[in-house]
Image (cartoon, helix red, strand yellow):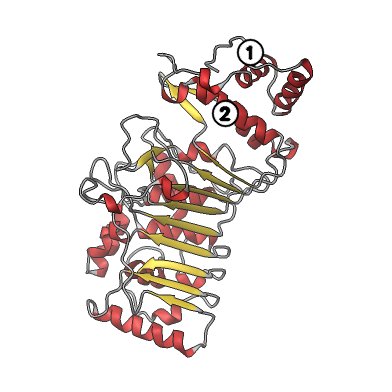
Amino acid sequence: MDYKQVKSQRDLSNEEIDLVKKAVKKGGFTGLQLDRVVNMLMRRMEKTATYYDYQHRESLGTFITQALTAILIVVSPNLVSMALTHPSGLSHNHTIEFPLAQLLRRANASPENTPYLCHLRSIYVINKNDSTWSDGRFYLPLDLSGCWRLFDNFLSIESVRVDIMEKDPNEELEFKEKYSNISKISIHHSSVGSLYLANLIWSCKTLRDFQYSIGGRASSDGGSPIFSPKAFIKVLCAHKKTLEILDVDAESQIHIFDIDDEEERDYALNEYESPFESGISDETCTFYQLIWAYGGSLKEFVALKRLSLGINFLLYFAAGVRGEPYKKREKLDLVDCLPNGLEYLCVRGYQKGENEEHDEQMDALMTFYKSGSSQLKELKGIDELIPNAEVVRDPDNDDHLLWSLEELGYESD
């Protein structure tokens, strides 16, 4: 660790210092690491002015705060939920392992032999930018995959949540299959592509709850990542026996639905975000080949209880994704394509009178719902428009559309 020890700033008895050392040792810190973490705990926050070589995350305050957090975790064996910023930092292009990152990495490598964090179920990643230039208008880069690997093997871990993120340009996707214990993923007010989401889904041993939405921020470069509904559904099909909740609010960024001709649209879906895309890496192509072996439709998601999608995405999902080559789809009756156990359905972006086919499908759906002949208990988006989420195009003049961490009680970025 890039940390310089100084004289203790706290007046503790030898007995009290021994208790601190015992807790630090319990966290797996030994030798020089033990001495440094204890020294961090012996410093006071008001005396941690930022030196020229400890900028942003490398500040002394970060070391001390993480040391305190690590020890609190060690002495809290029944901890079930936690919120944290990404616990690793970069300095001159090399990664600094702060105390919390070290503690989590060790626990994740050997969870069966760790007396703490064994009951942790939920983690919220507080996505904050270290840059003083951040002003709350744009999505923030986050290496979620790197953060994910600090806790995805915990014995009781279930859910990971994050907001206002975009892919970190230095983040590398690993495409590892079914190694993570995480089964619930929530990424809201964010901007990542279907490949990024597919990589996360592919890593889950079991997937029960997946939520993703765009909006609430602007893109710093004005662009948006590609979202392929075909690739996304195919990777979901690896979990069609376990997925209980699916909520994707990204249809305004799925421009492929703007293509009216069905065969032309299918061609475009195979040209991008697929094994047939040119210019992608061998690793990415191999990953696409693996998920392209999967196929299925909405009806086959037998565990699904709650579903929220845009109208076009919903109908595409209902029709299903199969193999190649293209075959013209038969006329679809949405009500016959719903999972038998579905209890809640939210349809976004439907405006009565704009599309004749959509009107027929939604009228039949409402009749089906009112008949009471199914498990469907709640239906939204038919009588009243629920708009699809939109990226904030002009954050300077539409600041009322911006989403902030303050809405969850955290300090804004």
Contact between marks 1 and 2 (CB within 8 A): the answer is no
Tell me: residue 337, above or below residue 179.
below
| Apparent side of residue 261 relative to residue 200 in the rendered image (left or right) | left
> Dot 1: what SS?
loop
Q: Position of residue 93 (x, y in %)?
A: 41, 21
- Residue occupying the point 55% across, 54% down: 184
> Residue extending furthest top?
7
The quadrant in which the C terminus is found is: top left
Which quadrant does the N terminus fall into? top right
Q: Nearer the viewer, residue 291 or 45?
A: 45
- Tell how many labels: 2
Which residue is painted at 63% across and 42% down in the image? 153
Q: Which residue is mark 2?
A: 66
Q: Quadrant of residue 336?
A: bottom left
Q: Which residue is mark 1?
A: 8
Query: How far separated are the C-alphas under marks 1 and 2?
Result: 17 Å
N-terminal of the pair, mark 1 or mark 2, is 1
The type of residue carrying mark 2 is Gln
